[in-house]
Image: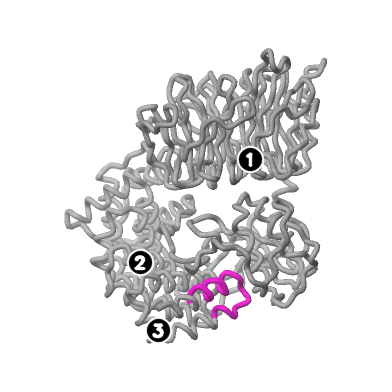
Amino acid sequence: MDIDFKDYQLRCELRGHEDDVRGICVCGSEAIATSSRDRTVRLWSLDSNRKFVSSKILLGHTSFVGPLAWIPPNSEFPLGGIVSGGMDTLVFVWDLNTGEKVHTLKGHQLQVTGIVFDEGDVVSSSVDCTLKRWRNGQPVETWEAHKAPVQAVIKLPSGEFVTGSSDTTLKLWRGKTCVHTFEGHSDTVRGLSVMSGLGILSASHDGSLRLWAVSGEVLMEMVGHTAIVYSVDSHASGLIVSGSEDRFAKVWKDGVCVQSIEHPGCVWDAKFMENGDIVTACSDGVVRIWTVDQNNVAEQQELDLYTSQLSLYKSSRKKVGGLKLEELPGLEALKIPGTTDGQTKIVREGDNGVAYGWNMREQKWDKIGEVVDGPEESNRQLFDGIQYDYVFDVDIGDGMPIRKLPYNRSDNPYDVADKWLLKENLPLSFREQIVQFILQNTGQNNVTFDASFRDPYTGSNAYVPGQPSHLSDISAKPTFKHIPKKGMLVFDAAQFDGILKKIIEFNNSLQSDQEKQNLSLTELNVSRLGAIVKILKDTSHYHSSKFADSDIDLLLNLLRSWPTAMIFPVIDIVRMIVLHPDGAILLHKHFEAGNDILVEVIKKVTVSPTIPANLLTSIRAVTNLFRNSCYYNWLQKHRSEILDAFSSCSSSPNKNLQLSYSTLLLNYAVLLIESNDQEGQSQVLSAALELAEDENVEVDSKFRALVAVGSLMLKGLVRKIALDFDVLNIAKAAKGSKDAKIAEVGSDIELLTKQS
């Protein structure tokens, strides 16, 4: 379908905020209000030259400001008003005529996350799980909206409200009565918007956007962001805009992403103006307006400057394995043969660092894939261009990305914890946990703190380790940082062009071999493989794209008939097929119909001498099966032979094989705990312990193995077996690791061994 669409270009940048811009409120056609982590609200108004300038700065919040709502001009507010909510739990009502606070609304216990102006009343949502209605500065109604933090609230044209929550649902409210719960997202619902005449838009931590009918039916799902989606908005033209942690504001039309606007930082919010222009709020502290009107596009010099900003931002963050990109060798380094099978080498290809593995059998370097940031190797670690004594990896669990926590030994850990929790938008209730983490991992347990230190948010004295607690409501139940593991991990990145290129290369080789010509693909089948790959690459259409039975037949026949040394790119396509909703279901139907070639492939690729590429693609294909519950019975049925077949990966010098094997074990642990399969749990426990105590296993693989061990021990079914395997010594060794997350999960397991 052709989509009539003009690209948005930069109109202007609004500079003034001193930290992340968090929220946007469009105030009619003449002004914009923005909120920031710098604790201010700014009003930007059109001047006589039709340029937006900062016209008011609203000061009063003591922590970062988030949601905003506009009060259109009325008798009480001749020039209109603004309602703001902050991390400080307060809601302020501002008069834009004077720039002064008219009301301070106190009552929420935790961060305010959403605000709606409702015919003179203010309705607010909070992390404290409640909604509150305020009238003339006083609370008139409070009700628990969800059992988890409420992250957003909007008002429908009907007068009803919709909330989004960390419990993954949306709820429709008629007064204080929930009339419908919308289920479908797999993670926190972070942003909401009304799409006129159609329904409700939602943005989620699961990376997707959804359009819902008020009746609860999902009308459309939009997938394309690669990280948390924080905001969503729509325009009368039918366009939708979303903002994400992946640094893009994406523009959608008819469910298709028609433009991705890159930013030099996280896009916290994105809103349409009445004329169709888009306003974005970025973590670099800049508000930007984007337009399709050529008469309003910024001067070329300003456009070039923004392109330069993006380039500088990306290059400043570009590190590979702790090394600067420019320090990596070029492709010429691949002319030097490797010395051991599986040996890895990282080289520079354009703007990326790419890993290659030495294929001893074929005497060549096989491309593994692009390398992401790795640990710094100097004594002082670099983070965002600044050197620190420590840069810790903090895993807050539940599938959330690893967070970086920089720290200098001269810093006050309480101050660092407070600022970091605010920056990462995490509850201040984590404060003591973060402080203890810092103290434990820096060996500062005997530090004496300045008695004059005060909590900037409560004004109370700091808790000093070793002193008696004055809190009476601390739970006696032990808390763990990394267990139990919830959800399944998959390998969802693929070099599709390389996969196709390799298949065509092998096919040409078969065609030139008279004895094997009959195994080669026809031009039609090569074309069909190209079409399959095209569907797999288009992730934004996974909700609607389909495969034919013949597509699955083609792949399975190649796995069955092609020489073993040539099947790894075909296995790689199957690995991605099982992540596609329709592809996964079709492949499963073939399994049920007796066309289960995968077990045969596993046996074929794990017979010595093995080919690393075959092992890597096949173990990752099996690991990806855990994404879809229809394969759970198959995975349990073949559990023993799968784990036995891939057991050699635990001692492989190839780090990618180690990581894939540990991920397989972790997924099996989650599945077998859910199904209460004690025999299976014991097998996984034994394999995970073997991996965890091997000194040659790299950090990420060891971490996943330890998380599997801890998760299996949690319910007590196999705890005694673990103790018999001397898990306590393994935990203590992990606890002494220099790597923060290994030390933490070691502490988790040690704590488990002490439970009755």
Q: Is residue 747 magenta?
A: yes
Query: Which residue in the rendered view is the most extreme toward the left?
Result: 593
Q: How is the image coloured?
A: one colour
Residue under label 1 = 267
Residue under label 3 = 723
| Residues at circles 1 and 3 in contact by the CB criterion of under 8 Å | no
Which residue type does callout 2 highlight?
Tyr
Which quadrant of the figure contains the C terminus? bottom left
Label 2 to label 3, Cα distance in Å?
20 Å
Q: Earlier in the sequence, mark 1 or mark 2?
A: 1
Residue under label 2 = 668
Question: Can you tell which of label 2 and label 3 is closer to the viewer?
Answer: 3
Which residue type does callout 1 highlight?
Val
Q: Which span is picked out in magenta?
A: 734-749
- Residue 698: percent from left, percent from top: 54, 74
Label 1 to label 3, Cα distance in Å?
48 Å
In the foreground, 29 or 602? 29
Query: Which residue in the rendered view is the most extreme toward the right?
Result: 48
Q: Is residue 275 visible?
A: yes
Q: Is residue 609 visible?
A: no
- Residue 463: percent from left, percent from top: 68, 65
